[in-house]
Amino acid sequence: MAPCNADGNIRAMLKNVILIEPRYKAKYPPLGLMKISTYFKQKGFNVEFSKGIPEITLFDAAKEYDIVCVSTLFTYDYDIVIKTINEAKALLKKDGRMFVGGNMATVMHDDVFRDTGIKPVLGILDKPKMLGFDDGIVIDDLVADYSIIPDCPKDVAYTSATKGCEKDCSFCIVKKIEPKYIDYKKILVPDNIKSLIMLDNNVLASKRFEEIARDIKNVGAKTVDFNQGIDYKLATKKNMSLLKDMGVKTVRFSIDDCESFEKYERAVKISIECGFKLFVTSMLYNFNDKPSDLYRRLKINSEIGQKHNISVNSFPMKYIPLTAKDRKHIGKHWNKKFIRSIQGMLCSARGLVSGKSNFFNHMWGNSEEEFLEILWMPFDMIVYRRKYSEKLRSEFPSIKKYHDENDLISEFLEKYRTLDNERVNKLHEIVSVLKYDDIGDSKIDDLLRYYRLNTPSYEIPWSKSYRGSVDRC
């Protein structure tokens, strides 16, 4: 599998290429593979794309590939990626070559090599010859080939105008993938784009931001979204006006401590003056913070939205170590129950926390004490709050009704609040590891039965098997 140096010899030898994205969940299409597709198609090769290992039928059982490329993304998908790489070897011709790259392969290259025997291509493809061809072409500078992705919208494009980030946050992978901050790159997208998704990690740090704004406006997209967020500390009247002018609708900030909210609110005010009304703010949790720290950030953000009469949603993001091979990490101030509860609280709003005061107070609590009490509640009571709370149903009426609605939350909390401290601590010790078996204490066992609730799908209004009544009056 050693690379050849003579482009002519390789071109004569290599014809069939397959690009494989493992079967993990991904929010965006695999841009690296899409640019590699453009590269090989320009060379006249046959290029195929597959989500996971392609099924081999009798028709193509004898088909083999000269080049196999496998992308990687999150480290917590390590097992499925390694399995995909090893299975992909069977697709190679005897003298074929295999390339593995992407975020996970870069950060965990030693592990990947140990478990597959394939030495990964590190970082982004920002230099010639990274796939063995001595042709002077930088693959990262090519327009992505959207045609290889099934059902990919034709009027949406993903790109970036910068690379890397000037900061080096301990919880962030960017510096390891793109170690050098490049403050300007030509925007490369197909023609006739209506929506532009910018994947820059810190675009406002660019000294050439005005040029970037001009380039984006020239694309002609109706909407532009800096999906990875922008640094509120760098927000000015000038650059926020440029963002508004180029078609940005939603401002995406992030804030990871309560002490910086004065500067954060200043950035929000500047944004409002420039015409923005929609904000989504990311908040890391399960890192060095405590659950109460997350609540304070969510509460302050909600209050800022109410104060300025704008839509402010929070987007909690669970911290996972940069080299974790699964999603099981629990921060030192967290436990399995708290993590599970946060996930449940985010279910009904697709990961967002509404800043509307009534909704926020009911879902997340009026105080830190209430918030912690909600975290300790049984999971089904957290997710299906309206089914189990008469108060919520009366304050937030809906035509969508659960089968067999009741008031179990009030019933549970009444019993929970009468426990003595010793029993509370014992109950917390049990449920913190998601174990709900009886222990022989009648009061604790009585509460544990609520934790064993398992709401069937036919009781969930948005489920296809829902059997509840619908009151349309």
Image (cartoon, grey):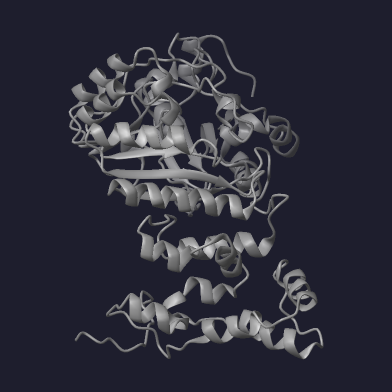
- Where residue 203 sits: x, y (%)? 40, 24
Left or right, 278 with respect to 62, comes to left
- Where residue 422 sits: x, y (%)? 80, 75
Q: Quadrant of the C terminus?
A: bottom left
Quarter residue 430 falls in: bottom right
- Depicted 413 relative to depicted 376: above or below: below
Q: Quadrant of the N terminus?
A: top right
- Depicted 11 relative to depicted 152: above or below: above
- Identify which residue, 65 or 370, lies in the foreground: 370
- Identify which residue, 435 or 195, lies in the foreground: 435
- Depicted 435 relative to depicted 473: above or below: above
Give the residue drawn at x 52%, y 72%: 382
Give the residue drawn at x 76%, y 75%: 421
Report how many numbered discs are placed on residues in the image: 0
Left or right, 78 with respect to 54, comes to right
- Identify which residue, 45 or 108, lies in the foreground: 108
Residue 251: in sight, yes or no? yes
- Where residue 259 sits: x, y (%)? 55, 38
Left or right, 25 with respect to 277, comes to right
Quarter residue 425 falls in: bottom right
Residue 121: in sight, yes or no? no
- Where residue 16 sits: x, y (%)? 45, 32
Left or right, 49 with respect to 285, comes to left
Give the residue drawn at x 56%, y 69%: 374
